[in-house]
Amino acid sequence: MVEIMNSLRLFCELLSLIAPNEREELICQIHNEAGKLCYVDDRDQAAILLELIGDQTEDAVLRLLCYKHAVFRAKWCAQAATGGGEGISRAVHLRILQDKQMHAEQDAPAQPPPLDTSEWHALRNLVLETMHTKRLDLSSVPVERYAELISLLEEYLKTGKDKPIDCAAKFVARLCPGVTEEVAEKSAWLVLEKS
């Protein structure tokens, strides 16, 4: 049991150290390990650790993620209560976590809606075609939503320098589903050409 708790503690500490797009996978491992442990003082141990990380982090997105999953764990704990006092104690912790989650939702930056694959391919094609044809065709792209990207492409056409088009390629590569920040930074053109 000590080994499981140490693994759980390590996984929770890693949340603040890994790339944001890898956190959900680690959260799954946290849930798997936490499911092997008993409740302590009418609280789920993973919920306690996630709450602690949420309380300590400056990252608003990580804070919200921690509280969201702590609430999930605390709900399971509260539903497993067998007596009145036990249920009340577990419900109190759940309520505290729900309040923290609500405040974190208000503080977290608005997340852009997920990009569908057809929109991503339109952006990819825009960058590749601009580079190859030296023309900017905006007919298939929502201009107001991608003003930064379009500005980079316009700068490339105006100056002929590689830096703006490379930045545009990295911008689009970062939006590609399943591509990490590191891959987008190092291999943006490969992502665009092979996807």
Image (tube, grey):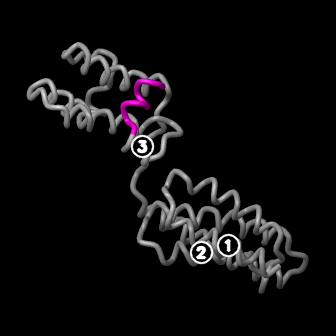
Residue 172's x, y, as percent? 36, 34
Q: What residue is drawn where x is 44% and y is 43%? A: 183
On the rendered structure, is 69 left or right of 116? right
Q: Residue at x 50, y 63 (%)?
A: 62
Look at the picture and state if 47 lies above or below 179.
below
144 inside magenta stretch: no
> What residue appears at the point 39 percent right and 56 percent down from the top-left corner?
109
Q: Dot 1, how many residues are within 10 Å of its Cα: few (below 14), some (14-19), or many (20+)? A: many
- 68 or 36: nearer the viewer: 36
Q: Is residue 75 left or right of residue 139?
A: right
- 175 in relation to 36, above or below: above
Q: Label 2 to label 3, Cα distance in Å?
A: 25 Å
- 58, 132: nearer the viewer: 132
Q: Position of residue 149 (x, y in %)?
A: 26, 33
Mark toward the start of the polypeptide (2 vs 3): 2
> Magenta part of the protein: which range?
187-195
Quadrant assignment, res 171:
top left
Left or right, 112 with respect to 177, comes to left
Q: Residue furthest right?
A: 82
Rate crowding at label 2 as few (under 14), some (14 to 19) or many (20 or more) other CA atoms within 10 Å: many
The residue indicated by pointer 2 is 51
* Secondary structure, magenta segment, majority class: helix
Of residues 13 and 76, which is closer to you in this image?
Answer: 13
Disc 1 target residue: 47
- Image quadrant holding the N terminus, namely bottom right
Residue in the picture at 43% in, 28% down: 120
